[in-house]
Amino acid sequence: MTSENTADGEGLLEFVRTFADRDTFTVEEDLGHGYVRLKVTEAERRQALQDIRCVEDVVKELVRNARDADARNIYVTFQKEKGRWRNLTVLDDGRGIPQALHRKIFEARVTSKVEDVVADRFGVHGRGMALYSIKQVAEDIQLVCSQEGHGTIIHTRIDTSNIPEKKDQSTFPRLEKDEDGRVSIAGGPRNVPRVLTEFALGSDKLNIFLGSNAEILATLYHDSVELRKSWAAGEDDVSRPMWFELGNIKEGRILHGFCESQLGLHVSERNAFRILELEINPLMSINELLNEGGVVLPARRADLHRQPRISWSDHLARRLSQDDISRISDSLQEICEEIGSRYYLQAETPVIKRRKNRLIISLGLHEREDD
Ligand SMILES: Nc1ncnc2c1ncn2[C@@H]1O[C@H](COP(=O)(O)OP(=O)(O)OP(=O)(O)O)[C@@H](O)[C@H]1O
Ligand SMILES: [Mg+2]
């Protein structure tokens, strides 16, 4: 269907004509749901393809799309495979993409941004070229799922021997404050943490998270538990993102399966179990990190790790950190060593499990072998 065929399309076309250079930028097709296919010159198309030169560019475009969709929370999983393939997933709780457009968004010049071709600190966008361009250069890009009003999850896999990335992906940029207290970037590697810092500085309404699959799942799980509490309390305006059901899961195997099938994230069953046991803690957002003193020192990704908080769990045993459990285990082993010698017994290293309000200690015994 061409834009001239619908009343809506005519309106859009008319609107675009008011600001666009007719030779380079007009609507070719009205795709419905507020989406159009733009007409652009070949030169512009080539320029857009060149825009994706490195992994940092991919992250920038995917996060920019999530931000443009009015997401409040954006989660970026960032995981390297065999030192070569970069897997990354961007999950957002923005406005989502209508079902009818799920495949079309990867085609050239398809955009919903006709009415707001915008220039942000990264330059002009709204040409409907970013996803198409990433698709040309990435090993894979998939829309894992998207629902109107519930957000979007996009996964991509990049061969870093073709599309490189900065070596250092741990250091956040150095920041400086001007006289008015405004924070800006003063230097540091042009890596993914820096791209995300730019977004975080650009909006105080946006929470941006960066971590491994397991760290992000732990964060989503925790956020879902909190959302579900607000929802159960009958609060208004509780969003129901794609990970809303996570907080209801109590078993590692099921968490692992849900994560793989619904969120497109691979997290081992073991790590899913550790998330439920709060051995992998939720991350703080980059915005929170910046507010917490990243301004003085260049922060590192490890600084995004939180200390466990008592309020995270109703289960008392979960309050104990793994380090303190190890201390209990060491002391126990020492005592058993001493007592066991009187009975000709040798104790194995104690295995301590945290279950609700209880520590379950298992201590294997053997006949002591004479020295
Ligand atoms: N995370 C998202 N949430 C909602 N809609 C999205 C998301 N990502 C992409 N889209 C939709 O897909 C369209 C195409 O995205 P794409 O990045 O290719 O082009 P664009 O953002 O319109 O322009 P540009 O080429 O400058 O990035 C967007 O206009 C938007 O409607
Ligand atoms: Mg875009």
Image (tube, rainbow, N blue to C red):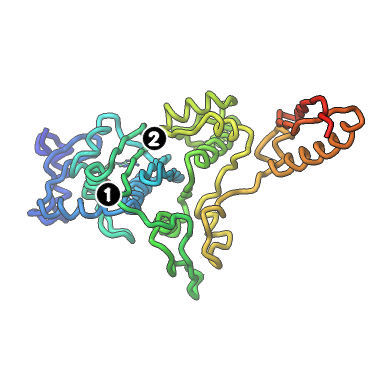
- Dot 1: what SS? loop
Disc 2 marks which amino acid? Gly
Q: Does residue 74 show up? A: yes
Give the mark, 2 or 1, whose residue is nearer the N terminus.
2
User: Horizontal placement of 367 versus 251: left or right?
Assistant: right
Given residues 290 and 71, the one toward you in this image is 290
The part of the image, by quadrant, that contains residue 353 is top right
Q: Which residue is rendered at x = 60% and y = 42% of the image? A: 281
In the rendered image, residue 89, in percent from the top left (x then y), is placed at 39, 41
Label 1: few (<14), some (14–19) or many (≥20) C-alpha neighbours in 10 Å: some
- Give me the disc on residue 149: 2
Alpha-carbon distance for marks 2 and 1?
36 Å
Residue type, label 1: Asn
State whether residue 15 is above or below residue 214: below
Residue 360, by quadrant, is top right
- Res. 162 mark: 1
- Residue most toward the front? 371
Residue sticking out furthest to the left: 23
Where does the image place residue 130, in percent across and percent down from the top left?
25, 47
Disc on res. 88: none
Residue furthest bottom in the image? 179
Camera-near label (2 vs 1) is: 1
Q: Are marks 2 and 1 in contact (CB under 8 Å)?
A: no
Across and down, in percent, residue 34 comes to: 24, 39
Closest to the observer: 139 or 236? 139
